Image (cartoon, helix red, strand yellow):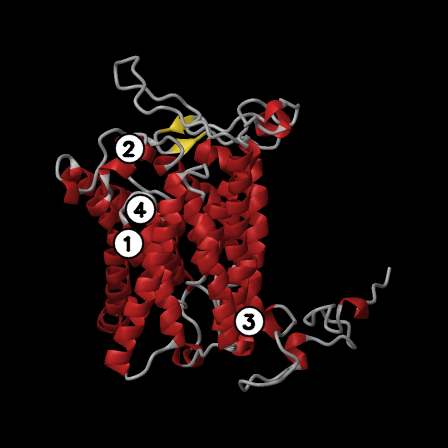
Amino acid sequence: MAASLAYQENLPTSPGWLNKGDNAWQMTAATLVGLQSMPGLVILYASIVKKKWAVNSAFMALYAFAAVLICWVLVAYRMAFGDQLLPFWGKGAPALGQKYLIGRAKVPESTHYYKNSHVVESQMEQPFFPMASLVYFQFTFAAITMILLAGSVLGRMNIKAWMAFVPLWLIFSYTVGAFSLWGGGFLYHWGVIDYSGGYVIHLSSGIAGFTAAYWVGPRIKSDRERFPPNNVLLMLAGSGLLWMGWSGFNGGAPYAANVASSIAVLNTNICAATSLLVWTTLDVIFFGKPSVIGAVQGMMTGLVCITPGAGLVQSWAAIVMGILSGSIPWVTMMILHKKSTLLQKVDDTLGVFHTHAVAGLLGGLLTGLFAEPALCRLLLPVTNSRGAFYGGSGGVQFLKQLVAALFVIGWNIVSTTIILLVIQIFIPLRMPDEQLEIGDDAAHGEEAYALWGDGEKYDPTRHGSLNTGTTGVSPYVNGARGVTINL
């Protein structure tokens, strides 16, 4: 049967190296990951927090998504995936020129040789789609990392400090982990396995979020003691977008619509479902009833845990990983948290340390145990990679996973600390207590619902008034068409 005309013609927009199926899947996967953030995490954050913080929490995610994209194409993409500057960092440069974007994608961009040799250490990967698809796909990963980090500081971080923090953390922290593990850095060539971001995204966001929560300071006492979700059903809707979007998250990592992406999508859903059921079972055993919030946490830890090995482990291992991701983070959150002075002191609003740092570290180490040799040969740049469960060099692989985790943890603690201390010189990291008592209306002059509740009171002397000409109230208080601009 002859190929269709679409594949016979090498049109200007369809060069010979372009595989339309792979390109279509890569753009679809990127869109699915984007939907996890917009509107997935926007909805989840807006609904899982106390009513008075719904707008602020959603806006932190919305702002991060937009700011990361512009910083990404201006400089950060090539710091994470460009030519090598240092063993852990790429050379920053714009990813905006048409010549660069319509060329065939390649990772890593720098050829790396064995020491004192002309033998290539790791072969360059050249997917069958243009660089523009890769730039956007990787942007969605950078954006969701930033938004996950935000979950640790919801309900008190100064929005102006957050606006400064986003581009600085992207450039000086995220790009280092991405280049080291994915873009051709020293951990990539050493053979550390991070299939789709267990370390680059989840361990990084969990550790950086916990560090940020320490420096920003806690919520006010009333919010720490009582912080109920304002809309559980919307929380489930946001969680559903997150779960379904993960098929693009892990399914897009092989840069092709191939057998590895199919394995990854199946394993992702198996692990998430197992983890949710285990977490819920533990809630029933110890608390007498299932919790919807607990089920969402279990879903999240399962998705995070499978991410570093989704396309590299067998499906029975995905069930094992789901059992462990539904139980170990549950123990750290429900038991160890209450016994640890440090965990008690640091106000990690949504428990990102447990759901992302603990689960991401767990997934990375379990991948070092369960990475299947045949699946590794399909994807990984370093030959003879395998988990410790399969003998041979697997024990070394587990140690590599551990060393990489320590590097990611250390870099995020140091970089996040320095960034926040610098910002603190110019902008307070935490809102004043009087604004924290009020919430969204004080921070934005807007509220999520046209109802008064939760005990917050509108104070015109603090918020300002449209009638007095002060600036505390949003100009959109009467809707977009209620705005009057005096020129």
Q: Which amino acid does label 3 sit on?
A: Ala
- Residue under pointer 2: 377
Q: Counting residues from the N terminus, which is met first, the one under dot 1 or under dot 4?
A: 4
CA–CA distance in space, label 3 to label 1: 35 Å
Residue 173 to residue 464: above or below: above
Percent from the top left, x then y, of residue 188? 32, 33
Query: Image point 27% across, 13% down: which residue?
Result: 117
Residue hosting label 1: 318
**In the rendered image of this protein, does residue 123 appear above or below residue 473?**
above
First-in-chain label (3 vs 2): 3
Give the class, few, some or many, for how many residues have Cα within 10 Å of label 1's Cα (few <14, many ≥20). many
Q: Locate the N terminus by quadrant.
A: top right
Residue at 34% from the left image edge and 67% from the top image edge: 276
Q: Which comes sooner in the sequence, label 1 or label 2?
A: 1
Label 2: which secondary element: helix
Whole-number angstrom distance, CA of label 1 to CA of label 4: 9 Å
Q: In what element is the residue under mark 4?
A: helix
**Mark 4 residue crowding within 10 angstroms, few (<14) / some (14–19) / many (20+):** many
Q: How far apart are marks 4 and 2 (CA)?
A: 13 Å
